[in-house]
Image (spheres, rainbow, N blue to C red):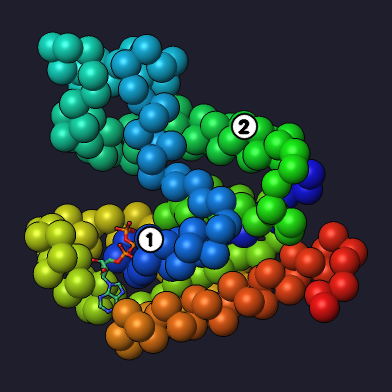
Amino acid sequence: MTVFLVGLTGGIGSGKSTVAGCFRARGWHVIDADAVAREIVAPGERTLADLAERFGDAILRPDGSLDRPALARVAFADDASRADLDRLTHPRIAARIAERLAVLGGQEPGPDPLIAVVDHPLLIETGQTGRFDEVVVVLAEEATRVARLVRDRGLPEDDIRARMRAQAGDDERRAAATHLLVNEGSLAELEAAAGAVADRIEAAAREARGASPW
Ligand code: ATP
């Protein structure tokens, strides 16, 4: 069964997870790239062994699991380390997501049309937008995002801004988008706008599989 593929991206704190929740509520299949990124470094995974080989056993806890703060300290220390971290993780995350999508496409029967969303903070940065039928970008001003993340997650402002600097800028995001959601209003407004985008995507998915939308 053909999967109609939707990429969902935006900067940290832009509202991606909220929009992903709206899409999930419509019965779409949502793959969370952050969850996949955690899976591929679980004990026993090849990526964890490769990271330990590159950055040293100090990135491992005594029980063999990944010590994330320790990895962040060494891997974000300089550009070459950062590049190695990306090289060892990004292709594997993409491959694991592709496996999931292949399994989904192999299932019969499924919802018709079958729509899968990949919620990925680095869809643009990792050059993957071309693989998707539609790309939904969530945008919000930096100050709005910082305020929400400090309020809701208690993250230190410096950490948030450091992560923002490693992400694509809004011009790149606008250029990659087939649907843009500007999240400067209330949560209810975001959910309504996400619903309208979902209607358009469902119509496009039906058209893509050649069926009449009526
Ligand atoms: P991350 O990149 O960190 O995973 P995200 O892009 O998935 O973030 P969300 O988790 O959806 O963003 O939103 C960040 C925080 O801001 C959440 O606590 C969410 O409830 C809140 N939020 C999102 N949109 C709005 C809004 N329009 N009004 C108020 N709060 C909002």
Q: In the rendering, which numbered label is found on residue 17?
A: 1
Badge 2 density bin: few <14, some 14–19, many ≥20, Cα 10 Å: few
Q: Quadrant of ligand 1?
A: bottom left
**Which amino acid type is shown beneath numbered disc 1?**
Ser
Q: Position of residue 167 (x, y in %)?
A: 39, 58
Residue at image coords 40%, 80%: 190
Residue at image coords 16%, 34%: 69
Residue 144 occupies quadrant: bottom left
What is the secondary structure assignment of the residue under circle 2?
A: helix
Q: Quadrant of the N terminus?
A: top right
Residue 90 falls left or right of residue 128 = left
Q: Position of residue 203 (x, y in %)?
A: 73, 74
Q: Quadrant of the C terminus?
A: bottom right
**Which amino acid type is shown beneath numbered disc 2?**
Glu
Q: In the rendering, which numbered label is found on residue 99?
A: 2
Number of numbered discs on residues: 2
Residue 213 falls left or right of residue 188 = right
Residue 18 occupies quadrant: bottom left
Q: Is residue 129 visible?
A: no
3 over 68 or under it: above or below: below
